[in-house]
Amino acid sequence: MTISTKGLFEQIELWVLAFVLAVALFNWPILSIPSPTEKIFGFPERLIYIFVAWILVILCAYIFDRRGAR
Protein backbone atom coordinates (compact mmCIF):
# COMPACT_ATOMS: atom_id res chain seq x y z
CA MET A 1 0.00 0.00 0.00
CA THR A 2 1.42 3.40 -0.96
CA ILE A 3 0.50 6.73 0.52
CA SER A 4 -0.05 9.49 -2.00
CA THR A 5 0.85 13.10 -1.22
CA LYS A 6 -0.74 14.35 -4.42
CA GLY A 7 -3.43 16.46 -2.73
CA LEU A 8 -1.60 17.02 0.54
CA PHE A 9 -0.05 20.35 -0.38
CA GLU A 10 -3.38 21.73 -1.58
CA GLN A 11 -5.08 21.22 1.79
CA ILE A 12 -5.54 24.30 3.92
CA GLU A 13 -4.81 22.32 7.11
CA LEU A 14 -1.19 21.83 6.07
CA TRP A 15 -0.76 25.57 5.58
CA VAL A 16 -2.34 26.24 8.99
CA LEU A 17 0.02 23.72 10.61
CA ALA A 18 3.01 25.34 8.90
CA PHE A 19 1.87 28.78 10.12
CA VAL A 20 1.44 27.57 13.72
CA LEU A 21 4.89 25.95 13.69
CA ALA A 22 6.44 29.13 12.28
CA VAL A 23 4.80 31.23 14.99
CA ALA A 24 6.01 28.76 17.62
CA LEU A 25 9.59 29.13 16.37
CA PHE A 26 9.48 32.87 17.08
CA ASN A 27 7.61 32.66 20.40
CA TRP A 28 9.20 33.81 23.67
CA PRO A 29 10.01 30.44 25.32
CA ILE A 30 11.79 29.19 22.21
CA LEU A 31 13.61 32.48 21.65
CA SER A 32 14.93 32.40 25.22
CA ILE A 33 16.80 29.12 24.63
CA PRO A 34 19.76 30.58 22.66
CA SER A 35 21.96 32.69 24.88
CA PRO A 36 22.19 36.37 23.88
CA THR A 37 25.76 36.56 25.22
CA GLU A 38 27.25 33.45 23.56
CA LYS A 39 28.70 34.07 20.12
CA ILE A 40 29.20 31.89 17.06
CA PHE A 41 31.58 33.35 14.46
CA GLY A 42 31.25 36.69 16.22
CA PHE A 43 27.43 36.79 16.01
CA PRO A 44 25.07 36.25 18.98
CA GLU A 45 23.43 32.81 19.08
CA ARG A 46 19.96 34.34 19.17
CA LEU A 47 20.58 36.27 15.95
CA ILE A 48 21.81 33.13 14.19
CA TYR A 49 18.77 31.18 15.46
CA ILE A 50 16.37 33.83 14.14
CA PHE A 51 18.16 33.90 10.78
CA VAL A 52 18.14 30.10 10.40
CA ALA A 53 14.51 29.78 11.54
CA TRP A 54 13.42 32.52 9.13
CA ILE A 55 15.25 30.84 6.23
CA LEU A 56 13.58 27.51 7.10
CA VAL A 57 10.13 29.13 7.16
CA ILE A 58 10.73 30.72 3.75
CA LEU A 59 12.11 27.46 2.34
CA CYS A 60 9.12 25.45 3.60
CA ALA A 61 6.67 27.98 2.15
CA TYR A 62 8.49 27.83 -1.19
CA ILE A 63 8.47 24.01 -1.24
CA PHE A 64 4.77 23.89 -0.30
CA ASP A 65 3.93 26.42 -3.01
CA ARG A 66 5.96 24.61 -5.70
CA ARG A 67 4.46 21.23 -4.84
CA GLY A 68 0.93 22.62 -4.83
CA ALA A 69 1.41 24.18 -8.27
CA ARG A 70 1.97 20.81 -9.98
Image (spheres, helix red, strand yellow):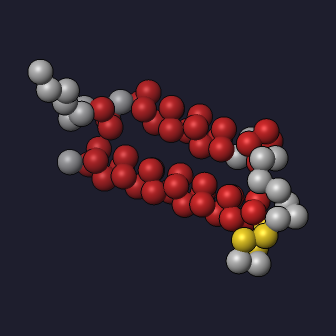
Task: Tally the marks.
Answer: 0
**Left/right of residue 61 with respect to residue 25 in the rendered view:** left
Quadrant placement of the N terminus: top left
Q: Quadrant of residue 45?
A: bottom right
In the depicted structure, whether residue 1 falls above or below residue 17: above
In the depicted structure, whether residue 12 falls above or below residue 70: above
**Left/right of residue 54 with respect to residue 8 in the rendered view:** right
Q: Residue at x 77, y 53 (%)?
A: 34
- Residue lying at the far left in this picture: please name it: 1
In the depicted structure, whether residue 2 falls above or below residue 65: above
Percent coordinates x, y for residue 6 in the rendering: 21, 35
Front residue of 44 and 8: 44
Q: Residue at x 65, y 44 (%)?
A: 25
- Residue lying at the far right in this picture: please name it: 37
Q: Residue at x 82, y 65 (%)?
A: 38
- Residue lying at the far bottom in this picture: please name it: 42
In the depicted structure, whether residue 28 falls above or below residue 36: above
Percent coordinates x, y for residue 56 in the rendering: 52, 55
Percent coordinates x, y for residue 46 in the rendering: 76, 59
**Left/right of residue 4 with respect to residue 27 in the rendered view:** left
Percent coordinates x, y for residue 4 in the rendering: 19, 30
Q: Residue at x 59, y 43 (%)?
A: 22
